[in-house]
Image (cartoon, coloured by chain):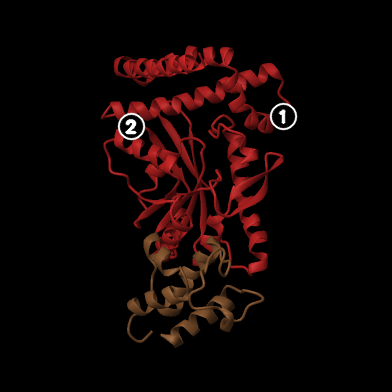
Chain colours: A brown, B red
């Protein structure tokens, strides 16, 4: 799980091209959107695509998305529960 | 006193609806069209409100028109809108009623869907958008529609009247992240997602030139397309005869992913192409614009 969280943080910083923050500075429980990391709805779109691309996990609807996108912690839990074997 | 006036207004409006429904039952679409003429004329001559609603658009579309021409324009636009409403009711009341139409660019649209990367179909509040949505059913892939609750109610009403199941799944734009998470998933499955490209109802926006002035347009569609690699198709319907409409694929573009710092600039570029397509449509069908509010202040 720790490795997965590290991977998610790296993807967020690298692929969403966040500036002024390193993966290590992102707290596991910090909110991803608005007052937390400051991501917006356009980032949410890219994050859905990135989760599918890197982990083979599809976020299907708003209930799933809302639960998964709270923090790195919840996203890691969501991915680990659904990740196909070998990805 | 004003409460009594409002109550009287509501009762008169309900009476008007009842008369139109009776006319549709007794004399069909033609009868209701005939009734529209004196009703619209009375409104145009006697109501200031109707001119306030049409003025923002008409003053941008026809900046040179004087007072009399503007009144004629208002009459034409309200008559066109009234006919769309009559058609909608007529289709519901008469089981055998049908509108004939064609889709210019159908092969291209089918080819876009066949690429398997999903298609973002942009529509607008012009012509008869419910008819447009009813006609994009032959796509071989599921269709989703990102909608605000008011549009959802109108669409449901349209298909309820037709006693048909809605041929698309609604994604509510007032949900989490404006429904963009679900829309992204649908595009990733290779499905079609229709989005209203004209009215801004929250979420990301961008400013473009439209009919000679700056206007804010919703921009999520272009970001969705860029992230998923889906093409964007602008599909607009127009009423071209008493029982005819024409649908046309006005524009196809392929937004590409951009850096965080260039994202806003790129969204503006794609939204401008939509605005240009809409302008082109309005050159051909100037009286089929149904955004009755100050569109340039949205």
Tell me residue B76's x, y (percent).
Answer: 56, 22
| Mark 2, other Cα within 10 Å: few <14 / some 14–19 / many ≥20 | few
Quadrant containing the C terminus of chain B is top right
Q: Which sits in the foreground, B98 or B108?
A: B98
Say which chain tag 1 marks: B
Q: In the image, which disc is placed on residue B222?
A: none
Tell me residue B179's x, y (percent).
Answer: 44, 56
Q: Earlier in the sequence, mark 2 or mark 1?
A: 1
Q: Secondary structure at mark 1?
A: loop
Left/right of residue B189 with respect to residue A30 in the rendered view: left
Q: In the image, which disc is placed on residue B63?
A: 1
Residue at horizontal 46%, vertical 14%?
Answer: B4
Q: Quadrant of the rendered structure where residue B279 is?
A: top right
- Residue B197 in sight here: yes
Q: Determine whether A8 is above or below B74 in the image.
A: below
Tell me residue A5's x, y (percent).
Answer: 46, 82
Say which chain tag 2 marks: B
Residue at horizontal 35%, vertical 36%?
Answer: B158
Q: Which sits in the foreground, B46 or B20?
A: B46
Residue at horizontal 61%, vertical 38%?
Answer: B295
Closer to the eye: label 2 or 1: 1
Tell me residue B196's x, y (percent).
Answer: 50, 46
Left/right of residue B242 with respect to residue B203 in the rendered view: left
Residue at horizontal 36%, vertical 15%?
Answer: B19
- Residue B229 in sight here: no
Whole-angstrom CA distance, mark 2 to mark 1, is: 37 Å
Name the residue beneath numbered marker 2. B98
Tell me, yes or no, whether dots 2 and 1 are on the same chain: yes
């Amino acid at each position: 799980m720790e490795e997965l969280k590290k991977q998610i943080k790296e993807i967020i910083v690298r692929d969403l091209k966040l500036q002024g923050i390193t993966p290590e500075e992102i707290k596991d429980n910090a909110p991803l959107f608005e007052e937390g990391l400051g991501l917006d709805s356009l980032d949410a779109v890219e994050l859905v695509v990135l989760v599918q691309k890197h982990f083979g996990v599809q976020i299907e609807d708003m209930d799933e998305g809302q639960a998964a996108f709270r923090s790195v912690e919840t996203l890691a839990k969501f991915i680990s529960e659904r990740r196909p074997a070998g990805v | 006193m004003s409460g009594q006036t409002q109550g009287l207004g509501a009762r008169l409006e309900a009476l008007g609806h009842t008369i139109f429904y009776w006319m549709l039952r007794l004399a069909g679409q033609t009868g209701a069209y005939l009734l529209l003429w004196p009703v619209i004329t009375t409104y145009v001559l006697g109501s200031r409100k109707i001119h306030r609603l049409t003025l923002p658009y008409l003053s941008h579309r026809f900046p040179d028109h004087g007072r009399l021409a503007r009144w004629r324009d208002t009459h034409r636009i309200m008559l066109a809108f009234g006919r769309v409403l009559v058609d909608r009711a007529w289709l519901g009341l008469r089981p055998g009623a049908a509108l004939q139409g064609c889709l210019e660019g159908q092969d291209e649209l089918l080819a876009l869907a066949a690429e398997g990367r999903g298609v973002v179909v942009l529509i607008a509040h012009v012509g008869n958008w419910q008819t447009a949505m009813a006609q994009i059913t032959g796509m071989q892939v599921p269709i989703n529609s990102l909608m605000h609750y008011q549009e959802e109610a109108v669409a449901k009403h349209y298909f309820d009247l037709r006693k048909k199941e809605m041929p698309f799944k609604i994604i509510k734009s007032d949900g989490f992240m404006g429904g963009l998470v679900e829309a992204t998933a649908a595009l990733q499955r290779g499905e079609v997602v229709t989005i209203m490209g004209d009215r801004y109802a929250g979420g990301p926006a961008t400013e473009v030139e439209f009919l000679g002035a700056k206007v804010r347009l919703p921009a999520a569609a272009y970001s969705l397309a860029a992230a998923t690699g889906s093409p964007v198709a602008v599909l607009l319907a127009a009423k071209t005869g008493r029982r005819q409409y024409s649908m046309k694929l006005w524009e196809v573009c392929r937004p590409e992913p951009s850096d965080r710092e260039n994202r806003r600039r790129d969204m503006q570029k794609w939204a401008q192409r939509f605005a240009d397509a809409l302008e082109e449509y309005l050159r051909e069908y100037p009286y089929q614009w149904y955004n009755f509010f100050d569109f340039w202040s949205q």
